[in-house]
Every structure is written in C-alpha cells, then in structure tokens.
Amino acid sequence: MNAALSIRGWVEEDGVVLTDGEIQSILDDEPKRACRFGGEFAIEYGAYRLRDHLGVVSGTIPPGTLQKNKETICHIIPDPPEIPLEDALQKAVLLRKGRRSVVALSGGVDSSLIAAIAELPCIVVGIPGSHDLKRAVEVADAIGCELTTVVIDPSEVESVLRRIIPLLPSAHPVDVSIAATAFFLCRAAADHGYDRIISGQGADELFCGYTRYLDSCDLKADRTADIADLPRQLARDQAVAGLFHVHLSLPYLDTRVVRAADKIPVEEMIRSGTRKFPFRQVASAYLPEDIAWYEKKAMQYGSGVWKVIRDRARERGFKRAVQGYINYLQDGKVEHGY
C-alpha cells in the first residue's frame, strides 16, 4: 500500500514496541494481527483506522476498534501473558519510554515508582509553595532524576477554567480542578519539547488508594465502580492534552498490570490502615521507604489549584460551594450561594 501511516502514540506486540514500518507490514499482509495490538495509539493508514483498547489516545473511532473502509474488522483486545505484579509494573513503564517522554512527578508513590523505573526526565507543576512542588524536589533528589519545576501563576487559573470547561464531559468541581492542573502540566510539557507524559493515573483505582476506601462497606464493589469510571476520566484528560498535541501515557492501566492487580484479593489491598499495600510493597524495592509508604494529597490539592479555585469562588461571591462559580464561568449565570 502506498498510503502514508499516521500514528499518534505507540504500538506493541508481545511486549515489543513496533516501528512504523512493522505496523505498515502487518496491516498490509496480516491485518487481523492488529486485533491483539497493545499500546496507546490512534492510527490512520489508507482505508484502516485503529485505536487502542482503552482509548487512551483520542481518535475518530471508538476505543478498541480496527476499521477498514469504516467497517469494523475486529475489536482490539491485547492478550499478554499473566506475569507477577512487579514484572508487570516494570514492563508497563519501560514500554512507555520514548525519545520525547517525560514523567509527571508529584512526589507520591505512584509517580515516584514510574520515575525510578523509567529513569527519564520528570516535570512537576504547582502554585508557589504548594505541596507537590516541594515534595517532587525531595523525591527527585532522593532517586536522582532530572526535574523541571513549573510554577503556576494563580492569576491565570480563572482564564484557564474559562478555556477548558466547555471541553470537558463534566463540569463537576473535582473534574474541573483536575483538568485545570492537567492544562498547566500539558502546556509545560509541550513547551519543553515533550509529546508523551507518563502519568500515575489508575493506581488508586486498581489498588484501593483513595481515603474513602478505609470506610468502605463493600470494597470490591467500590473498586469496581471506580475502575468503571476511568474511561470518563480519560475523556476529561484527553480534552485538555489535545490542546497541546500531547498525550498522557498510563502504565498502571496496562493490561499486564490490571491482570496482576485483579489477582490480588481485594481485602489485601488495605492492611492496618495502609492503602495500596501490595503496590507499596513492590515500590519499596525501587524507592526509599519514606517515599514508598508516603501518603500523598490528591492531584488538585497537592498542586494548590483547588485552593485557588475555591478562593476565587469566594471572591466572586460564591461562598458556600464552588459549583456555582463553575456554572458562572460556564454560562454566565450568577447563582450566589449555590
């Protein structure tokens, strides 16, 4: 086929990252091999359209679809062999290393483990004096990684909110604050020449890392519900990343990692009040103990963006809830007190 291959992201088969030429040869000669492609990708090649099974990379067709002439040939379902959790985590991270890849380092165990395994440059964003800026510097010093710190100007947050809210599938304050932090992260990465941001998203869902799990009456059901919500979160983050022509790469959602996590009895995910216990056990082989077992704030809180949004809402007269402020930015309707 003489058509040009257009690919965003990366493709792997049996644990090996494929070159553009190898992808073309497979689609030319054995297209159904692509039904087992792993990776994070959106591909256009002649009559073919392909997108990774989770939809990590945005595209014009549904996630996990291989189409030819707009007809679905198969659903893309990677099927790597099951391997132990530590091997799965290491493989998932190393597959995502690329020439223009950077690790989003916030200083928590999720991003710190990625940074330690990948040995790539790292980047952190935050409001001046924020938890993440300080913690990321400490972690970078401890594990010896190169770190770029990008300070967010609080006065810019409201204009960013106005820009991103129309793009998001949900205008819930938590989603908006996470998306705002992602905006600054993606912009900073693009400004520094990166097009792939390796992120720790998914670890809290897979390994029961949220604080609310400590009070769960049905840990298995809550974990299942949170995992089911990940595609919505991906859509939120894609909407922001696309503004800067970058994509988030998510090793903890690699099929190998998901399968290894699913093998762990859910009641073992939390031990003596420590969340993500099995994950932290693996991390302690790569990180100092005080990093592997550190309990970190959520992204929007650690970066300081949530506090800026909350304070700005109060300044605008929305003293009881941030949602009214978000609605005001979204459509200009003033709903004081809501």
Image (spheres, helix red, strand yellow):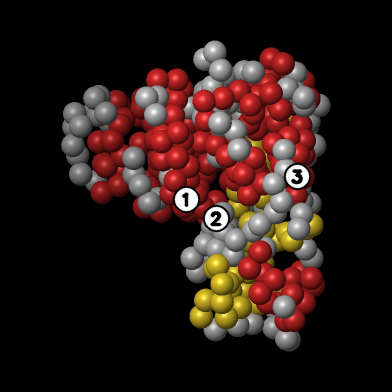
Tell which of 180 and 88 is nearer to you: 88
> In the rendered image, is residue 36 in sight?
yes
Residue 317, by quadrant, is top left
Q: Position of residue 125 (x, y in %)?
A: 59, 33
> How many marks can you see?
3
The quadrant holding residue 120 is: top right
Which of the numbered marks, if any, corresponds to residue 181? none
- Of the numbered discs 3 and 1, the one sitting upstream in the chain is 3
Label 3 secondary element? helix
**Which residue is denoted by mark 1 in the rendering?**
231
**Neighbours of disc 3 within 10 Å: few (<14), some (14-19), many (20+):** some
Contact? badges 2 and 1 (CB < 8 Å): yes
Q: Is residue 273 left or right of residue 221?
A: right
Q: In the visual, does 303 lie left or right of 214? A: right
Q: Residue at x 63, y 49 (%)?
A: 255
Residue at the spot of label 2: 54
Disc number lying in front (3 or 1): 3
Say left or right for 57 vs 336: right
Evaluate if marks 2 and 3 touch, with contact meaning CB atoms under 8 Å apart: no
Please say if 163 is above or below 156: below
Tell which residue pokes out farthest to the bottom in this image: 2
In the rendered image, which quarter contains the N terminus?
Answer: bottom right
- Alpha carbon of mark 2 to alpha carbon of mark 1: how far? 7 Å
Q: Is residue 22 above or below residue 203?
A: below
- The Cα–Cα distance between marks 3 and 1, rounded to whole angstroms, is 23 Å
**CA neighbours of label 1 inside 10 A, class few (<14), some (14 to 19), many (20+):** some
x 64%, y 28%: residue: 279
214 displayed left or right of 102 = left
Residue 121 visible in the snapshot: no
